[in-house]
Image: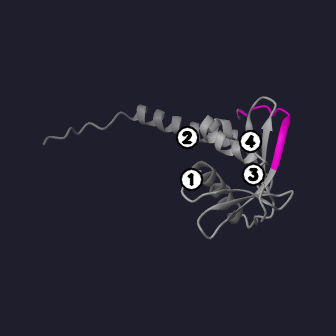
Amino acid sequence: MHMHDSPMPRAPLLAAGALVALAIVGSTWARWTGIGRAELPTSDATAQRELRFEDRSDGGVSVIDAATGRISQVLQPGHDGFIRATLRTLARERKRRDIGAEVPFVLRTHADGRLTLEDPALNRRIDLEAFGPTNAGAFARLMDTTQESRP
């Protein structure tokens, strides 16, 4: 096999490197300053519910209404994967920051039809509609207060 001894042109390599560096600097600048960050305007909440979640010995998850302390629903093992994955992500971040589970999550419906999950402990808000109607609908079921049961 014959290899050419001509080196790759230097100008395109420098230009590519400069473009990568500019992209990194630009994204870092936007993250630090908030410039260029897209954020949906917040509409008024039409309903909200403060919820805590506790793992059960059978692999399920108890959904607890923080206002009453009662179990409102139980997520059965092997079901509600989107809810579980979302909560696992937030719980992992809380644990990393040494924040306990005492502060409840806030599930809100908004006047514009959006549904958000907020974690006041982490100061994070997740627009659940961004994950599609099926996933948002899974959380929308948690707004149902008619399923209340005793702890």
Mark 4 or mark 2, earlier in chain? 2
Secondary structure beneath label 3: loop
User: Which residue does the numbered mark 4 point to in the structure image?
Assistant: 116
Identify the residue at horizontal 75%, vertical 31% (top origin). 113
Report whether residue 85 is seen: yes
The span from disc 4 to disc 1 (Cα, nearest Å) is 21 Å
Q: If the image is split into quadrants, where does the C terminus sit?
A: bottom right
Identify which amino acid the numbered label 3 is placed on: Gln
The extreme top residue here reads 112
- Tell which residue pokes out farthest to the left in this image: 1
* Type of the residue with mark 4: Thr
Q: Is residue 14 left or right of residue 5?
A: right
Circle nearer the viewer, 2 or 1: 1
**Closer to the camera in the image, 124 or 48:** 48
- Marks 3/2: CA–CA distance: 54 Å
Q: Which mark is residue 21?
A: 2
Residue on which the image places disc 1: 79
Q: Distance of mark 2 from mark 1, alpha carbons?
A: 44 Å
For residue 92, which quarter of the picture? bottom right
Q: Residues within 10 Å of mark 1 (few under 14, many from 20)?
A: few
| Dot label at residue 147 | 3
- 118 sits to left or right of 68: left
Disc 4/disc 2 C-alpha distance (Å): 35 Å
Q: Residues within 10 Å of mark 3 (few under 14, many from 20)?
A: few
Q: Amino acid at mark 2?
A: Ala
Front-most of 151 and 14? 151
* Secondary element type, mark 1: loop
Query: What is the count of numbered marks?
Result: 4
Magenta segment range?
38-49
